[in-house]
Image (tube, rainbow, N blue to C red):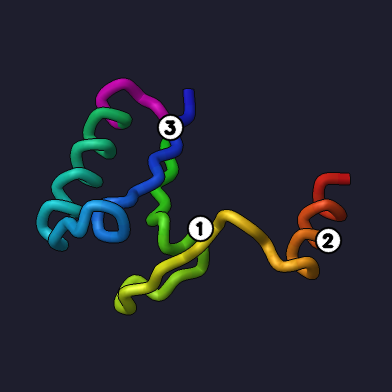
Amino acid sequence: MHVLFIEEGSAVYSHDPETRAKNINFIREICERYSFTYTIVPIERIFDIDSAVDTFLDMRIADPETALKIEEEKK
């Protein structure tokens, strides 16, 4: 079993660093207790967003160049 935890505390819920660390530690402890391997990824890394900057990211429509790249990657 491998657990992938997308940590979205600050980006989505505006959690402070203490709450964020508490949630990450909880996931780690559970995974280690049951001998699961795990990966913890902040959502800011997925979208290459600077977590220090309050950024709005509109993911509804990709520009034509990005849409073409996405289609090429699917092949």
Q: Which residues are magenta?
A: 32-37
* Residue 73 in picture, x, y percent from top left: 81, 52
Q: Is residue 26 above or below residue 8?
A: above
Q: Which mark is residue 59?
A: none
Q: Quadrant of the C terminus?
A: top right
Q: Is residue 6 above or below residue 34?
A: below
Q: Nearer the viewer, residue 16 or 39?
A: 16
Amino acid type for the residue under numbered disc 3: Val
Image quarter for residue 54?
bottom left
Q: Is residue 60 above or below residue 63?
A: above
Q: Which mark is residue 3?
A: 3
* Residue 30 in picture, x, y percent from top left: 25, 28
Q: Is residue 13 above or below residue 28?
A: below
Amino acid type for the residue under numbered disc 2: Leu
Looking at the image, is mark 3 or mark 2 earlier in the sequence?
3
Amino acid type for the residue under numbered disc 1: Ile
